[in-house]
Image (cartoon, helix red, strand yellow):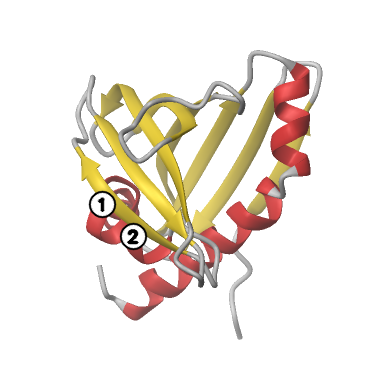
Amino acid sequence: MKTVLTFDFSVDKENKTINVKREFAAPLSRVWAAWTQSELLDKWWAPKPYRAKTKTMDFKEGGYWLYAMVSPDNEEFWCRADFHKIVPLKSYAGLDAFCDAAGTINQDFPQSFWSNSFNDYNDNTLVNIEIKYEQLEDLEKIIEMGFKEGFTAGLENLDELLASGDN
């Protein structure tokens, strides 16, 4: 019998946030590694049939992750995550934005501030994610772009990666 893992995705328009609570059937150290090491992020971050491709990653406060989501036709959509605060095996937070291949932020798209926390939970790991936007219009634009569906698919990729033991 397959265990049902916690998954809650909610949009709080009043506070301009997306809140995601997601449980993974793996110990905290493995889940943390999957969220903070580029070689593992590349295996699950993009929703299929896309794939993630890291150009550079420096996971430290003041560092950043520059990566592309690559379509089946090899079209690249670049993003940059700047790390502001990291508490190893507990949490990290930073600014996420669309950009070009050099990491220059694209001001035509919303930027978001992510706060991720990781907790032991019944022999599994519970990840709490808060994604905050400056403007309600920014939040609405991201939702219209299919964020919920794409992010949910990526999290399912992570389930597969963790189940495979390939991390």
Does any portion of residue 29 appear in the rendered image?
Answer: no
Please tell me which residue lies in front, 3 or 86: 86
1 and 2 marks in contact (CB < 8 Å):
yes
User: Residue drawn 61% across and 25% down?
Assistant: 108
Residue at mark 1 to residue at mark 2: CA–CA distance: 6 Å
Q: Quadrant of the C terminus?
A: bottom left
- Amino acid type at circle 1 is Ser
Q: Find numbered disc 2 in the image and state the secondary structure of the residue it sits on.
A: helix
Percent x, y of residue 112: 55, 25
Disc 2: CA contacts within 10 A as few (<14), some (14-19) or many (>=20): some
User: Residue drawn 60% across and 44% down?
Assistant: 21
Residue 37 relative to residue 79: left or right: left
Residue 9 relative to residue 59: left or right: right
Please tell me which residue lies in front, 126 or 18: 18
- Exactly how many numbered labels are in the figure? 2
The residue to which callout 1 is attached is: 38
Residue 4 relative to residue 120: left or right: right
The residue to which callout 2 is attached is: 42
Percent x, y of residue 98: 49, 34
User: Residue drawn 39% across and 34% down?
Assistant: 80
Q: Residue furthest bottom?
A: 1
Percent x, y of residue 22: 56, 51
User: Residue drawn 49% across and 28% down?
Assistant: 114
Quarter of the image where one finds residue 107: top right
- Amino acid type at circle 2 is Asp
